[in-house]
């Protein structure tokens, strides 16, 4: 558990969240080399690592809470890592889509997305290819001094989203989502 | 780490006043922009539907959430409907502008508008001819009556010829619009029709909704031409005049009146009346009397017809007040930030609204009517004189880098200059120089300012880039304001920035027209409603060559647009067959269908299309490439 205490994660205050989905758009574009407009024209599907959810009369977001990481233990291809700053990260390039992490996650925070594939030319049946995605707090946008710039936090118009290491928020976030 | 402050404007006088605003603790549009970040992604993509109260519905453009609204409307329908609604509003603004002027002309023909007169009889006869009105042996007042009556009939015409449309759109384009079934019948019903189609449970076919926008656009270009040309009859057709621009045109020792908005009906009479009240101003201690300056498109109207200085375009309107030297800001309609009232409350400035159907919350209202225009204008100027005693000299700081500019290049003025080169066939020298490549093509800049872009940066950057490549640059509206303030409407700018071919042509025409040097690098064709002046010039080229506009190396660019009027103007330019660059990502990208139709598919059907490019240098390259594509097709 000591590792978990140090991990950073995203918390969205349901009192402030308006459910506008701006964080999803920001997440999806910040994890892509396309901006929204060029992605539309190129037919590229953008994938968010978070999801706006409604609970009773409130809205919040659902994403990985950077826990003890059973996903990391489950991964057979060593593409899930615990970064020094306290973020569990999937190397999306190397992910083979085996879904073991997806099954290991206790909080349904990993999404398996089918990747677009060209039709095989040898007449064989097209095999579905998946990749695992989850919140990495925009690790790739981190400053050299370890300051994180998570796109969802920057995009939130009501400042409902924050980065925290306070584990009481982790409990709060999970209990909001029914865990 | 020190954060570099965001560059807000390239207008030096505006930078100076933004700094003063900070010192004075007065908020500007840039502060409100910062506070508004981030802006909602669903609005940005056009995917928020608020048409009925089952909503708001939002389509998830990322594909995980809902793909349909509660009624079943998908992203394409929602985006197309939202766009059509915006275009209807833009067209309505032009319609009311033109209607107001046509009414005044009608009132004049009934001797009921004593402040107004026919200032340009030649223009009246020219308009009458193009509206197919018999002028032989008739008194001027009779012709005025018929021009005004036919114009007013065009708004609701149920049968017969849509006169203004026939006067504005060339025969080949009309045939194309007819073939597509998108010829409008009149000015008013297209707007009503467009709005009705967007009601819940009405039209959901995105292509047909977009074609309704195209039909609306064909009517809008006709309305705008009416607005411009009837104004020329009433107030004179612009001719080249020397003037000055930017916030430095305000005077410390004068009573400064800033006229802001769009319609010349108001500002012209305020100018007339102010001229008679100068002595009174001097008695109050303002040694330079009354100084009238223009803001936004009123600024262009005044600059074009009278050489009155232009202080600001859209995004620097508040800064005019922040100089602390403006006694009154007099506004009519469109593009007036509600914020000016609060800005004014920090100084002695009185904001005066003038139209009964365009009141500004917190402003002093003086009801302005054509029938009693002089009395209204006198009240307005008196309010400015009263405010002068409240001016706090400690709060006055006027920038001191006035920029020279030449304005007044109406269609008629350009033709007159060309006539000095070829008396018989004035359009020929222009065509010849396009054919021989001295002029590679023409780009018309129009549109607004937008806080998403560094104020005026796209206009100035693109103009320099295009002029270097021998593109003739025309400008209207806040584009014209930007380029005037930046010194690109001068002969020196031609010397400095024009490519060799362009410079040779501008010099030859300028010399022949007696300017003692070249024409300015950018020709100011007027306010945003005046864009049809450029259409007439383009039609002359097309008709002479026997082709339609979709063949000509002519493009339009609105690199800083924001308003719904700019959206409909861009749309009609594309519907007339021209490539239209926009430097702001439009609120349609939530629909792949609408996005690809506007930027690609539309070209196959109508010859024109939108080009979205936020980088000004890239945008200039793309327009140049479009021009080359068209030149190649023409074999030149």
Image: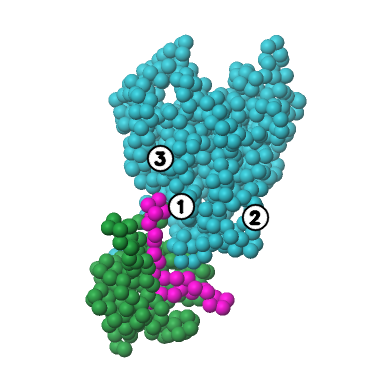
Chain colours: A green, B cyan
Near mark 1 (Cα within 10 A), the count class, few <14, some 14-19 or many ≥20, is: some
Q: Say if the magenta span includes residue B380.
A: no
- Quadrant of residue B470 in the image? top left
Report the chain holding disc 3.
B
Near mark 3 (Cα within 10 A), the count class, few <14, some 14-19 or many ≥20, is: many
Q: Which residue is mark 2?
A: B201
Q: Which residue is mark 3?
A: B459
Near mark 2 (Cα within 10 A), the count class, few <14, some 14-19 or many ≥20, is: few
Query: Are the residues at dot 1 and dot 3 in contact (C-beta closer than 8 Å)?
Result: no
Query: Magenta segment, which residues?
Result: A38-64
Relative to A112, say whether B530 is above or below: above
Q: Which residue is mark 1?
A: B592
Determine whether the residue tagged by mark 2 lies in a helix, strand or loop.
loop
Between B402 and B385, the residue placed more toward the observer is B402
The quadrant of the picture occupied by the N terminus of chain B is bottom left
Relative to B78, say whether B238 is above or below: above
Mark found first going from the N terminus, 1 or 2: 2
Q: Give x and y (percent) for residue A85.
A: 28, 76
For residue A123, side relative to residue B533 (left or right): left
Mark found first going from the N terminus, 1 or 3: 3
Query: Are the residues at dot 2 and dot 3 in contact (C-beta closer than 8 Å)?
Result: no
């Amino acid at each position: 558990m000591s590792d978990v205490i140090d991990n950073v994660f995203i918390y969205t205050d349901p009192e402030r969240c308006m459910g506008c989905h701006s964080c999803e758009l920001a997440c999806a574009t910040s994890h892509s080399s396309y901006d929204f407009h060029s992605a539309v024209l190129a037919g590229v599907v953008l994938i968010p690592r978070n999801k706006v959810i409604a609970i009773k009369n409130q809205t919040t977001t659902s994403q990985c809470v950077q826990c003890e990481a059973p996903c990391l233990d489950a991964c057979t291809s060593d593409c899930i890592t615990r970064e020094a700053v306290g973020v569990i990260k999937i190397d999306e390039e190397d992910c083979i889509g085996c879904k073991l992490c997806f099954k290991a996650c206790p909080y349904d925070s990993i999404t398996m997305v089918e990747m677009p594939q060209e039709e095989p030319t040898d007449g064989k049946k097209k095999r579905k290819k998946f990749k695992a995605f989850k919140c990495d707090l925009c690790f790739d946008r981190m400053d050299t001094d370890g300051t994180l710039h998570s796109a969802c936090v920057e995009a939130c118009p009501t400042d409902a989203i924050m980065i925290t290491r306070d584990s009481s928020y982790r409990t709060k976030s999970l209990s909001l989502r029914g865990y | 780490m020190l954060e570099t402050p965001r560059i807000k404007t390239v207008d030096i006088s505006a930078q100076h006043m933004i700094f003063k605003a900070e010192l004075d603790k007065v908020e500007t549009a840039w502060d409100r922009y910062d506070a508004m970040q981030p802006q909602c992604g669903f609005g940005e993509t056009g995917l928020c539907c608020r048409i009925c109260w089952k909503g708001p519905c939002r389509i998830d453009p990322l594909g995980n959430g809902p793909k349909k609204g509660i009624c079943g409307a998908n992203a394409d329908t929602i985006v197309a409907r939202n766009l059509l609604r915006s275009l209807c509003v833009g067209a309505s603004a032009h319609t009311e502008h033109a209607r107001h002027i046509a009414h005044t002309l009608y009132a004049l023909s009934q001797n009921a508008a004593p402040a107004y007169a026919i200032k340009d009889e030649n223009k009246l006869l020219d308009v009458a001819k193009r509206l197919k009105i018999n002028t032989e042996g008739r008194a001027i007042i009779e012709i005025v009556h018929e021009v005004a009556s036919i114009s007013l009939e065009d708004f609701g015409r149920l049968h017969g010829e849509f006169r203004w449309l026939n006067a504005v759109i060339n025969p080949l384009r009309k045939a194309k619009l007819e073939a597509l079934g998108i010829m409008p019948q009149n000015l008013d019903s297209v707007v009503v029709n467009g709005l009705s189609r967007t009601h819940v449970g009405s039209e959901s076919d995105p292509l047909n909704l977009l074609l309704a926008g195209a039909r609306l656009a064909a009517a809008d270009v006709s309305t705008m031409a009416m607005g411009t040309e009837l104004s020329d009859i009433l107030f004179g057709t612009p001719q080249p005049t020397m003037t000055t621009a930017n916030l430095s045109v305000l005077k410390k020792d004068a009573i400064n009146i800033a006229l802001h908005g769009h319609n010349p009906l108001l500002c012209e009479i305020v100018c007339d009346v102010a001229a008679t009240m100068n002595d009174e101003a001097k008695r109050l201690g303002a040694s330079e009397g009354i100084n009238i300056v223009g803001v936004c498109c009123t600024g262009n109207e005044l600059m074009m017809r009278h050489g009155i200085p232009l202080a600001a375009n859209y995004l620097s309107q508040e800064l005019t007040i922040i100089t602390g030297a403006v006694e009154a800001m007099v506004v009519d309609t469109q593009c007036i930030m509600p914020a000016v009232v609060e800005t004014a409350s920090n100084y002695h400035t009185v904001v005066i609204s003038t139209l009964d159907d365009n009141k500004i919350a917190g402003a002093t209202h003086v009801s302005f009517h054509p029938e009693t225009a002089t009395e209204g204008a006198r009240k307005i100027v008196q309010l400015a004189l009263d405010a002068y005693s409240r001016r706090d000299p400690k709060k006055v700081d006027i920038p001191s880098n006035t920029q020279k500019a030449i304005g007044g290049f109406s269609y008629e003025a350009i033709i007159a200059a060309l006539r000095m080169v070829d008396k018989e066939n004035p359009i020929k020298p222009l065509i010849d120089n396009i054919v021989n490549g001295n002029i590679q093509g023409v780009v018309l800049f129009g549109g607004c300012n937008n806080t998403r872009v560094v104020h005026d940066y796209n206009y100035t950057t693109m103009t320099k880039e295009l002029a270097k490549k021998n593109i003739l640059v025309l400008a209207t509206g806040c584009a014209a304001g930007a380029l005037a303030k930046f010194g690109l409407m001068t002969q020196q700018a031609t010397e400095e920035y024009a490519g060799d071919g362009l410079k040779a042509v501008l010099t030859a025409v300028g010399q022949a027209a007696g300017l003692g040097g070249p024409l300015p690098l950018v020709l100011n064709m007027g306010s945003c409603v005046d864009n049809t002046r450029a259409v007439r010039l383009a039609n002359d080229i097309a008709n002479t060559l026997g082709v339609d506009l979709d063949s000509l190396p002519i493009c339009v660019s609105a690199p800083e647009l924001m308003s719904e009027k700019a959206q409909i103007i861009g749309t009609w330019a594309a519907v007339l067959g021209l490539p239209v660059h926009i430097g702001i990502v439009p609120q349609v990208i939530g629909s792949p269908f609408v996005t690809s139709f506007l930027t690609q598919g539309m070209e196959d059907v109508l010859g024109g299309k939108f080009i979205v490019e936020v980088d000004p240098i890239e945008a200039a390259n793309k327009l140049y490439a479009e021009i080359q594509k068209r030149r190649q097709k023409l074999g030149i």
